[in-house]
Image (cartoon, rainbow, N blue to C red):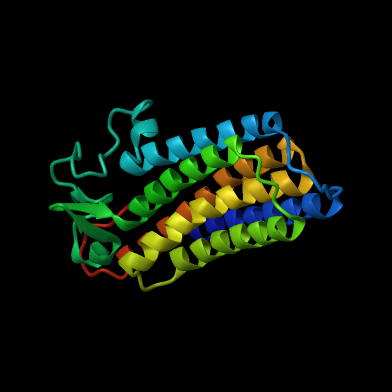
Amino acid sequence: MSRRARVFYFVMLSIIAAALLLVVFVISPRQDHSINSSDKLLPAAAFIASCLLCISLAVHPNWARRLVSRSSPDRDGRSPNANARKFRGHHPDCAMFESHRISWSGRELCSGCVGLMSGATVSILLMMIYVVSDWAVPGVLSMAFIVFGLGAVSAAFAEAAIGRRRRLLHLVVNSTMIVGFFMLVVGMLEATGSGVSGLLVVSFSFLWIDTRIQLSHWRHSLVCDGCPESCKMD
């Protein structure tokens, strides 16, 4: 399967997942009271665990792959092939990817990964507050949460696919996407009164973030294709 076909496949699956989520929201009976704390625990725990996984992959993107293969390149710059292109901030250390990195305390970091870590950290704190609170979210606000969450995911897809990369925008959009996942979980929990709907959002979030990664990889390949140098990113 070509990279473009793979991206199209993931985008279509993501659209279908969003549509299924909206169907669940529409057909579920509305509730006028706050969801029980016990019903929040499982989806909240799954969401927090997912955020921790997101943070770990943002820091070390290839740690899972290295569990099964010792020859995988280290995206922080240490490659097993001495002649291979080095990496800085999870990107090739060439001028074509300069706009994909940000500098922090003398280190170069991937702006997208910093955004994902920031959003995941904020979302973990928000979820903890939500679980221990008795806040009843009105139906209209639940719908607004869902709309915001789906909008944040769509914005992340669009931003990852565009040709021009702006460091700060990339950071903010990726951070907002993770916060959007939190709002989707809370919106569906409060609108349906069922923990299953929250778990559904958590499961879909893996698909959505993988789709964003596929879009980013596709854009990276286009950057390399337009570069006159002989080294090409896989």
| Quarter of the view holding residue 230 | bottom left
Q: Position of residue 133 (x, y in %)?
A: 61, 39
Task: Give me the residue at 26% from left, 59% from top.
Answer: 101
Toward the front, the furthest residue is 134
In-front residue for pair 93/134: 134
Q: Position of residue 43 (x, y in %)?
A: 63, 35
Task: Give me the residue at 64% from left, 47% from top.
Answer: 186
167 shown above or below 126: below
- Count of picture labels: 0
Q: Position of residue 9 (x, y in %)?
A: 60, 55
Task: Give me the residue at 87% from left, 48% from top.
Answer: 29
Horizontal side of 175 relative to 189 (left or right) equals: left
Horizontal side of 26 relative to 3 (left or right) equals: right
Q: Position of residue 124 (x, y in %)?
A: 48, 41
| Quarter of the view holding residue 55 | top left
Residue 135 visible? The answer is yes
In-front residue for pair 45/138: 138
206 shown above or below 146: above
Horizontal side of 23 relative to 11 (left or right) equals: right
Residue 211 visible? The answer is no
